[in-house]
Image: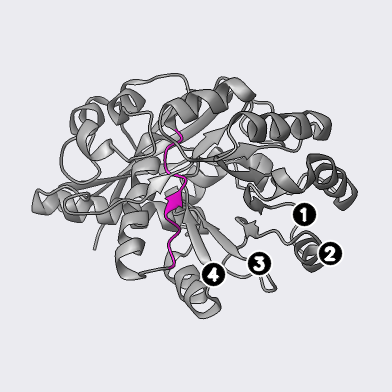
Amino acid sequence: MKRKVYVHQYVMFSRTGLNSRSRATEHVGALIRVDVDDVSGYACLHPWVELGDLSLEELLSHLAVGRMSRQIKCAIECADADRSARLKGVSLFSGLDVPLSHATIVGGIEKVELAVEAGFDTVKLKMGRDIAADVSLLKEVNTNFPELMIRIDFNGMVGFSELEILLNEIGEVTRRRLDYIEDPLAIGDNRWSLFRDQYGLKVGIDRGVEDIEGEFDISVVKPAINDLSKIASAAQKSRRSMVVTSYMDHPIGQSYAAYCAGMLNSSHSGIVNPRCGLLTHGLYEPTDFTILLGGSGPKWSGIEGASGIGLGFDDLLEKLDWKKI
């Protein structure tokens, strides 16, 4: 099967830094178009260098010579699925039940208020830059929205002593509102079990989740970088829950994550969490692509807004400037 690969580089602008490791608001990536027998399939490469990914330049140079890093392989798998659906003239979302999502929150109580107004019952708070501010926000969220389920993502940026301060300061009532804590410590820290046992909290892992061993409760799965079948098999054996999320990437990548969440939900009944993390386009300034995804609530609406075959966005993709590599 002879592939011809084309690239369109893009920049997306966030309203604030999107994780505790960086305050960058300009995010570069590339859409890729993979042609086989004159039928195109599309995918996204959106690296997070601060989290350990190769740079976009490195990814594109690897792509040009056929070097299959994990992220490139995932992008090719996305393009293949998209192309197969386009060849049949059908949408990847036809008849697919995509799980609901939590709201990904970068900011203060006003962002939580907007999420609740939009109908979210679960929020994921990106934390770790300022523990005192994090404590204040968690208390405020619990006071104002006592029924709201809370997930916290630290990106492995806090130490055990800071975690103890936060968990003790927020108190038992607020701790009970925590669904799970994602990446509270660096992978390999031998105090994970102590942390879980002492506070009775669930822990999620999102980096190196295919290979990491030990006691954790939630596999946070990103189709942009993860081997889904391997993680799903391990989750079934260990009775872990899987939370499928976007890579906070381009709507093409976000749509692929939603498709994968629906497929996993169908093929691995009972292990996909009923609240995934698929709705992240609102973290960015609007573009023609993000506008098509529409909807601000927990239900995936891309099937309606980004109509077309495959992953959708047909007209917009055709208009882009593609360069062969």
- Label pair 2/1, CB-CB below 8 angstroms: yes
- Label pair 1/4, CB-CB below 8 angstroms: no
Q: Crowding at label 4, few (<14), some or many (≥20) Cα neighbours within 10 Å?
A: many
- Magenta segment range? 271-280
N-terminal of the pair, mark 2 or mark 4, is 2
Structural distance between the alpha carbons of marks 3 and 1:
12 Å
Residue 325 in sight from this viewpoint: no
Q: Residue at x 47, y 76 (%)?
A: 236
Structural distance between the alpha carbons of marks 2 and 4:
20 Å
Position of 93 with respect to 225 (left or right) is left
- Label pair 3/1, CB-CB below 8 angstroms: no
Is 248 part of what is drawn in magenta? no
Residue 269 in sight from this viewpoint: yes
Residue marked by disc 2: 191
Q: Nearer the viewer, residue 43 or 215?
A: 215
Structural distance between the alpha carbons of marks 2 and 3:
12 Å
Q: Residue at x 40, y 68 (%)?
A: 270
Secondary structure beneath dot 4 equals loop
Residue 196 percent location from the top left of the image: 75, 63
- Residue type for callout 1: Leu
Structural distance between the alpha carbons of marks 2 and 1:
8 Å
Residue marked by disc 1: 185
Q: Residue furthest right?
A: 161
N-terminal of the pair, mark 4 or mark 3, is 3
**Mark in the foreground, 1 or 4:** 4
Quarter of the C terminus within the rendering: top left
Residue 163 percent location from the top left of the image: 82, 48
Is 278 part of what is drawn in magenta? yes
Give the numbered dot on residue 216.
3
